[in-house]
Image (tube, helix red, strand yellow):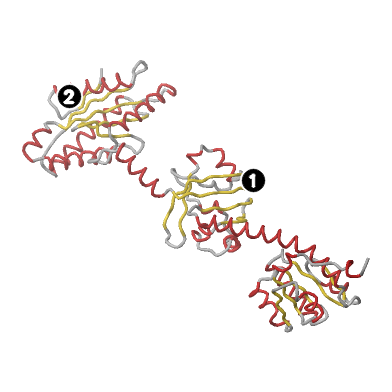
Amino acid sequence: MTDAAKEMTLSSDIKKLKLLLAGDNREIQDCLSENVKKIFVSANPENTFELYLKTSPHLVIVDMDEYPSSNIKLIKNIREKDYSIKIILLSESSNISYYINDLPCEINGCLLKPIDKNRLYFLLNTLVKHIYYTDIEKKKRILAQKILDAGEDLITVVNDKKVEFSNRAFLNFFDVKTVEEFNERGRTLCDYFIHNENYFGCEENSKEYFIDVLLKLPREKRVVSMIIAKYFEPRAFMLKINKLNNKQAVLVFSDITRISLKSKEFEKQALYDELTKIYNRVKFNEMLDFEVERNKRYGNNLSLIILDLDDFKQINDNFGHLVGDRILVETATVVKNTIRATDITARWGGEEFVVLLSNCDLENARKVADTIREKIKNFFVKNPPEITCSLGVAQLKEYDTKESFIHEADKALYRAKRNGKNRVEISK
């Protein structure tokens, strides 16, 4: 077999590589000039790292015998920038072990002077496979990051109290450039959740991991609110969680602020009286069902007042509907300001109002009703036209249903009307 047959050849993939040579070594350049199309040479160590940043090479060959201390610093800087880049050391045999021991990071190969061409080609052929695999993986990561950055959802990976990864939308929301900057603030992601009755918030001093607490909630309850840093405005998010292990999880925050506001608007339209801004009959019936059921389970007293404005039709006929509407609004305000925060009031229909009093027996409910009657009378004496009201009061009995409970209060109201109006009657 001839020497030519024994000589190793370079892989065709080598031609696609970009190679940076730190040190003006003519021997290396001669060996590779025919096969590597892009060789960048830096003879000055002061400019090598800048050239590296500008050219983004796949492979760096460093001649350690030229400016060894500067080249050790160069390798350290390159590794900090990109740990996956391939680095080969070139040196005299007597110095190579010294350089390797002095390096604070890994290298991918060594070449001794004078250059053994076969050794050089073998090393490059081996590394090129890793380079292209790494390059493909890097492109995939870049593509994945671009896809994640293209969306409006806030996406992050958390590991216990630290954020490990995020997309651009997440960084922009918190007005930071990197996840490291976010973590340096000394606050966990959970610390940014606004805690109130509508949104999930982390309990102080809780020993349970907040991801585990969230996962125990129904999906529709995994809603959080956070303040966008640039505008200091709250946003509402539906939170999707994919737990990777005991502490690590992928979190996706989908902004539902507009939907949430729209939902609250629809809820207000559906459950509140448009004129008086207190509950309507639908919402009152829902809450009455709950209170009746609770009364039967726990035996607490529950009383009901039905209020009707006396001769209200005459107000509309004599003063017009605008005045009539004002009286309804002011009546609702007087009633709301008279009862307890735990009591429930609603517009029952027309000029009728209802009040549900929890933990209140018949006699105390009668006193509340009479206070309401007196306050309404006095208010409209000072804010004419004058008007009074009649009220019927009932206490839920053991055998009562919701319907019979309402019927008893309604019968008492009818007696108050029949007995002269501007008075309170209780059920018998």
In the picture as drawn, the residue positioned furthest to the front comes out as 1
Q: Eyeballing the image, is 304 above or below 260?
A: above
Residue 318 image position (x, y, % from top left): 6, 38
Residue 86 visible in this rendered orientation of the protein: yes
Residue 7 image position (x, y, % from top left): 87, 68
In the picture as drawn, the residue positioned furthest to the right comes out as 1
Q: Which residue is mark 1?
A: 244
- Which of the two marks, 1 or 2, is nearer to us in this view? 1
Q: Eyeballing the image, is 342 above or below 144?
A: above
Q: Decide if residue 149 is on the left or right side of residue 302.
A: right
Within 10 Å of disc 2 (Cα), the crowding (few <14, some 14-19, many 20+) is: many
Q: Decide if residue 397 is on the left or right side of residue 387.
A: right
| Location of residue 86 (image quadrant) | bottom right
In the picture as drawn, the residue positioned furthest to the top comes out as 399
Q: Which residue is mark 2?
A: 416
Disc 2 residue type (three-letter): Ala
Residue 377 image position (x, y, % from top left): 16, 37
Report helix, strand or loop for mark 2. helix
Looking at the image, which residue is at 64% across and 45% down? 244
Within 10 Å of disc 1 (Cα), the crowding (few <14, some 14-19, many 20+) is: few
Disc 1 residue type (three-letter): Leu
Q: Is 212 in front, or is 381?
A: 212
